[in-house]
Image: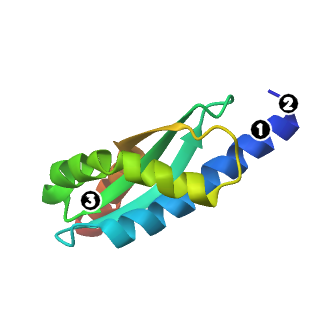
Amino acid sequence: MTERNAKRTDGVANQIKELSAEFLGREGNKTSLITVTHATCSPDLKRATIFITVFPADKEKGALEFAKRKRPELREFIKKNVPIKIIPFIDIAIDLGEKNRQKIDELLRNG
């Protein structure tokens, strides 16, 4: 991938991250806090993955299911706000790296 394409992919991923955070914040089910930590895009921009964390952690499964149910509406929201021809298929996943970092922080504080 050329540097120009990498910058474009990163730029689209960042826009998707920001718009997803706005969308999920507005549409959220109010029983949990969903935070979009980052997003990635495939080089051809046909797929994007949005990584989220959920607080409280016991609401994680329900929040992930909620976010996945909202994907068609999220895709429409992105289509209206990002000037690209192809809107990527959106996947949503729990950010395990952030979850692990939080667990380590907790262990260090309590250790």
Q: Is residue 73 above or below residue 21?
A: above
Q: For label 2, count other residues whose C-alpha is less than 10 Å away and answer few (under 14), some (14-19) or many (20+).
A: few
Is any part of residue 95 visible from this angle?
no
Residue at (59, 31) in percent of width and height: 46
Residue 107 marker: 3
Q: How far apart in space, not on screen, are marks 3 and 2 (Cα)?
A: 42 Å
Tell me, yes or no, whether the two marked residues, 1 and 2, touch with CB atoms within 8 Å.
Answer: yes
Q: Quadrant of the C terminus?
A: bottom left
Q: Which residue is mark 2?
A: 2
Residue at (15, 58) in percent of width and height: 59
Q: Does label 3 or label 1 sit earlier along the sequence?
A: 1
Q: Does label 3 or label 2 sit earlier along the sequence?
A: 2
**Number of numbered tags placed on the structure image:** 3
Q: Is residue 22 left or right of residue 68?
A: right
* Element at label 1: helix
| Residue closest to the eye, 23 or 35 | 23
Q: How far apart in space, not on screen, are marks 1 and 2 (Cα)?
A: 6 Å
